[in-house]
Image (tube, coloured by chain):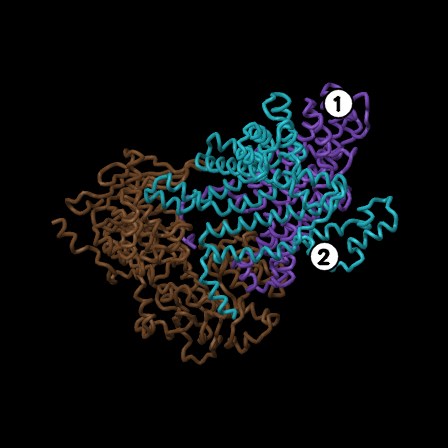
Chain colours: A brown, B purple, C cyan
Amino acid sequence: MRAPEEAMKPVLAVERLSVSFGTPHGETKVLRDVEFTLAPNEILGIVGETGAGKSVLARAIIDLLPKGGRMTSGEVRVNGKPVGKMTEAERRAMRGGQIALIGTNAKALLDPVETVGNQIVRVLQSHSRLNRKAAWTKAVQLLADVGIVNPEQRARAYPHELSGGMAQRVVIAMALVTEPKILLADDATLGLDATVSVQVLDMLVQRSRELGLSVVLITHDLGIIAHYCNRVAVMREGRVVELREVSEFLKQPEAVYSRELLAAAKVRPIPTLRSIGGSEMALLEVSNLVKIFPGNRPGQVVRAVDHVSFTIKRGETLALVGESGSGKTTVGQCLVRLIEASSGSIRFDGNDLLTTAQARFRPLRRRIQMVFQEPYVALNPRWRVRHLVDEPLRMLEKMSADERLKRVHQVLDLVNMPAHYAERFPHELTAGEQKRVGMARALVTEPDFVIFDEPTTALDIRVRGQIIDLVRDLQTRMKLSALFITHDLNSVRSLAHDVAVMNRGRIVEAGSMETVFSDPKDPYTAKLLSAELAIEHETEARVARRPKSAEERVG
Amino acid sequence: MTSFGFALRRPAAIIGLSLLFLQIVLIIFAPAVSPYSPTEADPLASLLPPSSTHWLGTDISGMDILSRIIFATRINLLISITSVALAFVIGVPLGLLVGYYRGFLSGLIMRIFDFVQAFPIFVLGMALVSVMGQEIWNVATVLAVLFIPIFARLIRAEVLSLRERPFVAAARCSGATDVDIMFRHLLPNALMPAMVQVSISIGMAILLTAGLSFIGAGVRMPTPEWGLMVSSGAQQMILGVWWVSLFPGLAIVLAVLCFALLGDVVRDLMDPMKAQQFARDPEIDLQPIGDNR
Amino acid sequence: MIITFRRQWEVLPRSLQIILGRLALVVPQMFGVLLVTFFLIRLLPGDPAVLLLGNMATPEAVEQLRDRLGLNDSIWTQFLVYCGNVLHGDLGVSIFTSNPVTVDLMERGPATIELIFYGMILTVVIGVAVAVISVRKPGGTVDIVSRFYGLAAGAIPDFWIGLILIYVFFTLLGWAAAPFGRIDVFLNAPPPVTGFYTIDALLAGDFDAFRSAAGRLVLPVITLAIVNAGGLMKMTQSVFSGVWESDFVRHARACGVPERVIMRAALRNSLPPIITMIGFLVGFLLGAAVLVETIFSWGGLGQYAVQAVMNSDYPALQGFILVAAAFTLLVYLVVDILYELVDPRIKV
């Protein structure tokens, strides 16, 4: 292992840390001999997939292991002092006082029935003897520091009144309020929109630089590592398999696993060539689609989809990109008539979908299918894979049970699932496998057109890579036409011929993927693209890896 | 080991199932196993304490308490199970329809449930039975009426949340019709709490039946019924004659306990995910990716 | 018009909006309750007039009564008349006591309310305390005891456990007061102010009466609590353990917030469902009171209702269930308002 920053003493040292969990079936090792140090002013990234033990590591550091967990060996030193030798009171003062934890899903981390200002005050008063009024002033000041507009008023808000990004800022304010030396950010921006996530991370890293904090950034996103961290530790099955400078890691990863991760996260070359000459007829033609929802108050309306038009040709893929609330999913739901559009027209291979009665639309369903976003909840938990994949066939095709079973096995093979998975229940599958089942369901009727709703969201790095490769494979093999709804711009680069960017119900920019991505015309598109955290190693880090003042301060 | 076997091997399940088995045996073989007639008075044997001839003693009219407890199993379980079965058969489809189709009629049905449930359950039961006449079948019908809203509401609440779940939208995209969605997708998923409620309700019904008889609003003497038996000993309890009320009360406790335990067993068996937990390691990574909504 | 009304509504403070909104809902509920009580008596097989007068009545007397009761009018007219009477506080005349039902109920009401009130307090104290301790110290004595108690409590008939308590604590041990009424027969009831003997006795400075009244309350209150605390405990356990293991509690701990402060926040978060459950408890307690009052000769509404059942005193029965439902609705109203006040997430 490399020695950190020459003469500087590490603020945090983890030495041969092992953690086990007791289960009814014996002990399970979750961390094995994890070892690293954190230098002052350093940002260390810890990356790994689900089950790597990242979150357990964070909790082990502050000695708050979840139920059933215990440290079997090793030591954690905070500023040279072993946590194991602290008294209970010292440990409590250490948590939040010296090491502050910033967790995932900020809204759940806040007390739902208390104002956020009071919650920050609560933390501050746990670590200092400040009176309420002074604490409140400081809380409001911090809310301003973390970029919350109108902090005085926001401090009086309850968590449910805040957006996800704002709640995350509150949690960061809560962490900074006690002026700790170390921040542990455990997937702190997971689930936020990319632009918000980048803003929050920029702010977090900038504040840490200004305050001279050391940060451990735990993430499953290599882009975050590439753009914000000095060093990276790659974790797999409870071990650190690689620990080195980020720039070296990106150029030349050592461990096989690291190479796999990087390869999976990289953009693939442009998908199959489009049909030459564009002579083919448009398969799907959407024009002036409008969907209006009633608002919270009578008379008020929300235009979720506002005069959206696009066309998709046979064998081509259009990516509809935008952030949450942009209306992109609503467009998809209108296409399969899960909700009825308010006005506009959708022509599919000569049929007008919107004027067709539901009953006559049913036969068309076998030609238009949708892959749902959340893999687990989109599968009936009480059905086996076989029945789940069979359902569209049973409903829409006139086939014998034997024929259907044969087709089910074919399509499972198509999505690279072993045949014996047919007997499993959804909860027995991993997230990636559930996603494949969802795709198998959509593909089993051999549709002409498939809508993929966020197919790469919330997946581990390698699984995401596999799904992207699978979709690319289907595009070439089945000449599939697809609408690809996503906020993951990076995956669009590997999957789509054309792109339409949606913002607040409108398409603000559309064109071929290369043109739009290399030369965005609309400021919103530019903003989206600037929030993309690419890992191609020529990319510049968003925030300077080394604070300039750091050497001066030390030297 | 299968999860099924595992769930059945818990001590609670063993006790619950044994008690159920015991009751079934007593119901079928009541005349064979009870030492005396349950309704034959013997003035010479009034209020005898437990002894080798009368294991649990006799009541004021000299009837053998053990025999009466055994025969009462028939009446008490008959009333309870019938009423819950009726409530289940009516309440479940009603809840499914009311949850799936939201319109004027659904609203009206829910309001009627509101009105009925505004009354404390025992008070309304008492009034209904006394107005309709104190017959076994009337008690069962009244209890069924009181339980219908419970089942309907339970199913409705489940359906309301299930119908918004993406797998329902996915089924619709696969061409499923309303009937398919209601009966193949929603009902099987919504049924679990109702099945658990069946068990709990049978217990409740046993307690309510006994309570009604106790205050004289249920079945009448000399029918062997647990609540009635407790009531027949109530006057003497204060004088130290404890056996007349104690034993039938214990029978009630055991019967209700049995169904409460079975409710837990049903819960474990019906839930594929929960059943799996017995055989599977718990999720160790605390915040798996995608768990952030 | 509507818009200006909306605007005026929106400037009202949240708490006032909650209270007014809930009050508006009570009116149709009360109407529904009246409908049920009215048709309940209509379920009587045969002629109500005959039932009221008994089989020996002459046809003239029956016809006269039919006329007086308005039984010859259309059913909706009768219902309207019934509603009007109820609004004027007229619930008819009890066949058994020959008093107006309203008078009978007013006389007996305080006895029942006092019983339920103390029963409720003990139930909540036992239920919540045991639940909180068992969640905080899993595997401890309280936790293990609570598991058995939670299972058993739901299975114990209240009328039976009441008798057992009397046998053990009065007959065998002689510790408890006699199970005959609210106060010793040789003592005078304190002058009524609140209707609660315990409070009235203290107000009057009559400590003998207080001691007797409090003593008489012990067994029935314990009976109510033993049977009902189990359900509340189980529910509180599941709510509180959910909160106790929730992300925000873990986060507060990771922020170094002391356990005492976390505990307070967790309890506050568990409050809304507990409040709802307490509302339902009132309904259970009212039902249980019917049985418990019978055992302890309490002389309250419950015993009155049982007498009504025994004597086929239908006006009395009808009056009682109407009052019981109205009382329950009132409690639900208070509970709903409290619920919305303590949970800022609820939209008004």
* Residues marked 2 and 1 touching at CB (< 8 Å): no
User: For the residues tagged 2 and 1, is the chain the same?
Assistant: no
Give the left or right position of residue A141, taking residue B286 as reference: left
Q: Position of residue A256 (x, y in %)?
A: 31, 51
Label 1: which residue? B47
Q: Amino acid at mark 1?
A: Leu
Chain holding disc 2: C
- Count neighbours of disc 1 (C-alpha within 10 A) and say few if under 14, some if 14 to 19, many if 20 or more: many
Q: Nearer the viewer, residue C275 or A201?
A: C275
Q: Which mark is residue A476?
A: none
Q: Quadrant of residue B268?
A: top right
A83 up-or-down from A211: above or below: above
Q: Is residue B227 visible?
A: yes
| Of the two numbered discs 2 and 1 in the rendering, the one whose residue sits closer to the viewer | 2
- Count neighbours of disc 2 (C-alpha within 10 A) and say few if under 14, some if 14 to 19, many if 20 or more: some
Q: Position of residue A421 (x, y in %)?
A: 51, 52
Q: Which mark is residue C81?
A: 2
Q: Quadrant of residue A359?
A: bottom right
Count the marks: how many? 2
Give the left or right position of residue C167, taking residue A186 as reference: right
In terms of secondary structure, where does tag 2 sit? helix
Q: Nearer the viewer, residue A234 or C168?
A: C168
Quadrant of the frame with the C terminus of chain B: bottom left
Q: Is residue B183 visible?
A: no
A215 up-or-down from A200: above or below: above
Chain holding disc 1: B
Q: Nearer the viewer, residue A97 or A350?
A: A97
Give the left or right position of residue A546, taking residue B14 as reference: left
- Look at 29% across and 35% down and name the residue there: A84
Q: Amino acid at mark 2?
A: Val
Q: Position of residue A14 (x, y in %)?
A: 27, 41
- Look at 19% across and 55% down and name the residue there: A547
